[in-house]
Image (tube, grey):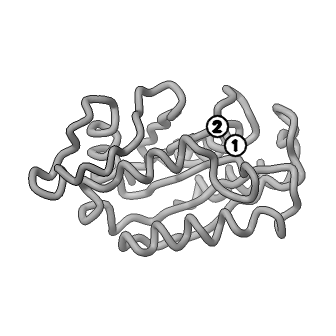
Amino acid sequence: MKNVLILSSSPRKQGNSDILCDEFMKGAEDSGNIVEKITLYDRNISFCRACYSCFKTGKCVIADDMAEILEKIRKADVLVVATPAYFLTMNGMLKTVIDRFLPKWQELGGHNVYLIITGHDRKKGLELVGKELTTIFENLGNTVRGIIWGEGVWQKGEVTGTKAMNEAYITGKNV
């Protein structure tokens, strides 16, 4: 049994990347894992101020939900990170969260990471997001085990019935 944490940066409830998160969660739970999904847009998360106080204290001066999220990331065995692609990169919410890794970045390694990336482009148009996130998470000392590509989807719910749905479930089941 593993502790699986899913970070969904979809701004739309039941948007395409959020749907894939739920499918991954279903597979992971069906295998007996403990799964929590955090919808980042439901949380109070401010931008990093680059004050670097965290270098001295080990904690951020901003009193919002990031301290709790960082602790949950630290304790997870498996981390799933989902984002729709916006202009060939991760969306702003996920970037804001990653920027806020700073106080605990040295404690955020050792996880198996799965990425979920969705967008209207085909895989070729989404690959930059995959490379970017893989680089970030591997530089933190994690292993990116796979990427689920929700390609060719734009409107809310278009991912339903695609091969990405089955892939998300099967990947979750096999974490």
Task: Determine whether label 1 and label 2 are within 8 Å by CB.
Answer: yes
Camera-nearest residue between 114 and 64: 64
Q: Is residue 140 visible to the viewer in this orientation of the structure?
A: yes
Residue ID for mark 2 = 10
Three-letter residue code for mark 2:
Ser
In what element is the residue under mark 1?
A: helix
Camera-nearest residue between 112 and 141: 141
Q: Residue at x 70, y 68 (%)?
A: 128
Q: Position of residue 137 (x, y in %)?
A: 46, 67
Three-letter residue code for mark 1:
Ser
Q: Locate residue 85 relative to residue 35 in the image: left or right.
A: right
Q: Position of residue 117 (x, y in %)?
A: 69, 54
In what element is the residue under mark 2?
A: loop
Dot 1 or dot 2: first in sequence order is 2
Q: 59 above or below 108?
A: above
Mark number, residue 26: none
Residue ID for mark 1 = 17
Q: 149 above or below 29?
A: below
Q: Residue at x 58, y 40 (%)?
A: 9
Q: Of discs 1 and 2, which sits in the foreground?
A: 2
Q: Locate residue 56 relative to residue 105 in the image: left or right.
A: left
Q: Residue at x 60, y 59 (%)?
A: 115
